[in-house]
Every structure is written in structure tokens, then in C-alpha cells.
Amino acid sequence: MANTLLPPAERDLTPDQVEALDKRREIGHTLLIIAGQFAIVAAILLLWVGQDLAWSPGGVHPIAYGFGIALIMFAVCGGAGLLLRRGAPRID
């Protein structure tokens, strides 16, 4: 009998498919961790963005560019991690 706690799409998987599903979720979890690290970096850079935008000459704003890149990486890694991690959690 199928486990009713699992989503319907995951109830009748073969062992190879379960292994691939676990691998996908591990990669998703890793991407979520990386997204969290980029969020921390972006929060730290946020402390200097205003000063960089106010005092850097012309179009030279290295802290603002780094902040923007950190936000983009946070969004990309977080979104990909959430997509890969979706489904029922693994119970050890």
C-alpha cells in the first residue's frame, strides 16, 4: 500500500527514482544555504550602500554594484533552491 503521507506523484517511485529525488532535494538545500549566505553578505553591504552612492565619483559605485549582485544571486539561488526542494521532506 502506498504511503498516504507522500504527495500522489511520489507514492509509486522506484528506488532509482527515490535516489534521484533525494539528490535533487540535496542540491536544492545546498542552494538555499548559498542564498542565505548571499543574504548575509547583502545585509552587510547595505550598511555602506548609501555612503557609496553619495560619495563615489561618477558611475563608480563598487559597493552598490556588489550589493546588487548579492541581491540577484540571493534571488536566483533562493528561487532555484525552493523549486528543487519542493515536495515532502526526507525523514531520517
Image (cartoon, helix red, strand yellow):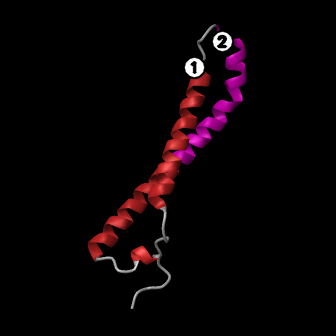
Please state the horizontal and vertical placement of residue 67, each as a whole percent of the image. 60, 30
- Residue pushed farthest left? 16
Q: Is residue 86 above or below residue 7?
A: above
| Residue bearing mark 2 | 56
Q: x and y percent of residue 47 in the render? A: 70, 30
Magenta segment boundaries in residue numbering:
34-57
Q: Is residue 55 left or right of residue 6?
A: right
Q: Quadrant of the N terminus?
A: bottom left
Q: Amino acid at mark 1?
A: Pro
Q: Residue at x 47, y 60 (%)?
A: 85
User: How far is mark 2 from mark 1, CA to CA?
Assistant: 9 Å
On the question of residue 77 being in view, the answer is: yes
**Residue visible at 66% across and 37% down in the picture:** 43
Q: Position of residue 58 (x, y in %)?
A: 62, 8
Which residue occupies 44% across, 77% down? 8
Q: Main secondary structure of the magenta part?
A: helix
> Pointer 1: residues within 10 angstroms few (<14), some, or many (20+)?
few
**In the rendered image, which quarter is residue 42 located in?**
top right
State the residue in front, 59 or 33.
59
Q: Give the residue displayed 34% in from the left and 72% down from the top.
A: 18
Q: In the image, is residue 76 above or below residue 28? A: above
The answer to whether residue 10 is above or below residue 38 is: below
Task: Check disc 2 and give the amino acid type.
Answer: Ser
Query: Can the viewer see residue 29?
Result: no
For mark 1, give the secondary structure.
helix
- The residue that label 1 is drawn on is 62
Q: Of helix, strand and loop, which one carries label 2?
A: loop
Residue lying farthest to the front in this orientation: 8
Mark 2 and mark 1 lie on one chain; the one further toward the N terminus is 2
Report whether 44 appears left or right of 12. right
Assess whether mark 1 and mark 2 are in contact (beta carbons under 8 angstroms).
yes
